């Protein structure tokens, strides 16, 4: 019998989400916050500072001169891009290891996380009037539960995939049947342990079950679509593959057709250089 309490306790062994990142993200959500206030927080985090300058000086921006100061970099990037860098700089350490349970090589879960974040923004721009503030955060962290559950999935993979092959279970349902909990629920508990807002917690919990989201939830259906599109592109496809249930009602909700999905994929590759720069964050 698998001890669910032991799984929950293993969540507490994860490093906490850094206070610098949390405080910086809160400042960025305040339209009246000054650059000086933001600098006073970020300047003490070497990884974030280095990655701000790294992205500004990357081929994507193609500037004729080098950006040397944090202040100059913050002004150039703008709040939306800066939020992405802060999140990526912070989250990468949780995703970069090999994920044996899901048969993902080192860095593959991270690539999937970043690609889903980028695609969620592209989808949002097509189907909403304005991007929800928490969207990129929830999309980037939607599979964080796989980090904790990987070892157990590896141990029980044959039993899980047998349930899937019987045709009555999705991979998520197979996890829940064999382990007593699935990676989406574990991810939600991690987000709770980091004191993330409830909308992010719920989006992570329901990213495979958007039909359970409330009608006023702007995150979950978009992250569901972004995740499925990312998997269909072969980015971060592990042993669970595409063994998840399709939800045509989400497509219908937004009036999306197959040609729209093709357009989203094209837009993603237009953003690929930016994605590559984020993937290289240390």
Image: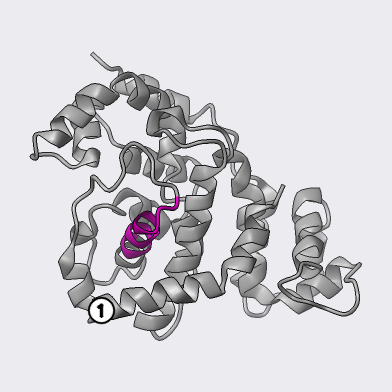
Percent position of residue 174, x then y: 20, 33
In the depicted view, which residue is nearer to us: 53 or 162?
162
Q: Which residues are magenta?
A: 224-235
Question: Which residue is most to the bottom?
Answer: 129
**Quadrant of the rendered image containing residue 51:** bottom right
> In this rendering, is residue 206 above or below 12?
below
Q: Which residue is mark 1?
A: 256
- Main SS of the magenta part reads helix
In the depicted view, which residue is nearer to us: 157 or 142?
157
Q: Quadrant of the N terminus?
A: top left
Residue ID at (32%, 58%): 228
Any part of residue 175 in sight: yes
Q: How many marks?
A: 1
Percent position of residue 173, x then y: 19, 38
Q: Is residue 242 left or right of residue 58?
A: left
233 in magenta: yes
Percent position of residue 56, x then y: 78, 69
Q: Badge 1: few (under 14), some or many (20 or more) residues near its Cα, within 10 Å?
A: some
> In this rendering, is residue 141 above or below 211?
above
In the depicted view, which residue is nearer to us: 61 or 259?
259
Residue ID at (55%, 41%): 95
Residue ID at (40%, 86%): 129
Any part of residue 132 in sight: no
In the depicted view, which residue is nearer to us: 270 or 70?
270
29 in magenta: no
Task: Name the image colouring.
Answer: one colour
Secondary structure, mark 1, is loop
């Amino acid at each position: 019998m698998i001890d669910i309490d032991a799984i929950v306790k293993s969540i507490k062994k994860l490093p906490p989400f850094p206070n610098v990142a949390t405080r910086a993200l809160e400042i960025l959500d305040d339209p009246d916050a000054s650059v000086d206030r933001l600098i006073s927080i970020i300047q003490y985090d070497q990884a974030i500072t280095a990655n701000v300058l790294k992205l500004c000086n990357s081929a994507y921006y193609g500037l004729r001169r080098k950006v040397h100061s944090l202040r100059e970099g913050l002004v150039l990037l703008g709040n939306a891009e800066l939020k992405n860098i802060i999140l990526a700089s912070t989250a990468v350490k949780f995703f970069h290891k090999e994920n044996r349970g899901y048969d993902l090589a080192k860095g593959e879960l991270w690539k999937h996380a970043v690609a889903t974040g980028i695609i969620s923004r592209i989808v949002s721009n097509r189907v909403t009037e304005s991007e929800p503030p928490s969207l990129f955060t929830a999309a980037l962290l939607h599979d964080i539960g796989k980090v904790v559950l990987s070892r157990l999935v590896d141990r029980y993979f044959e039993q899980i995939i047998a349930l899937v092959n019987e045709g009555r279970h999705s991979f998520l349902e197979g996890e829940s049947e064999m382990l007593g909990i699935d990676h989406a629920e574990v991810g939600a508990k991690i987000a709770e342990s980091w004191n993330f807002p409830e909308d992010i917690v719920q989006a992570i919990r329901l990213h495979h079950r958007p039909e359970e989201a409330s009608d006023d939830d702007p995150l979950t259906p978009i992250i569901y679509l972004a995740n499925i599109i990312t998997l269909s592109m072969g980015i971060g496809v592990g042993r669970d593959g595409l063994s998840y249930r399709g939800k045509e009602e989400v497509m219908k909700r937004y009036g999306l057709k197959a040609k729209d999905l093709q357009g989203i994929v094209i837009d993603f590759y237009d953003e690929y250089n930016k994605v590559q720069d984020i993937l290289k964050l240390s």
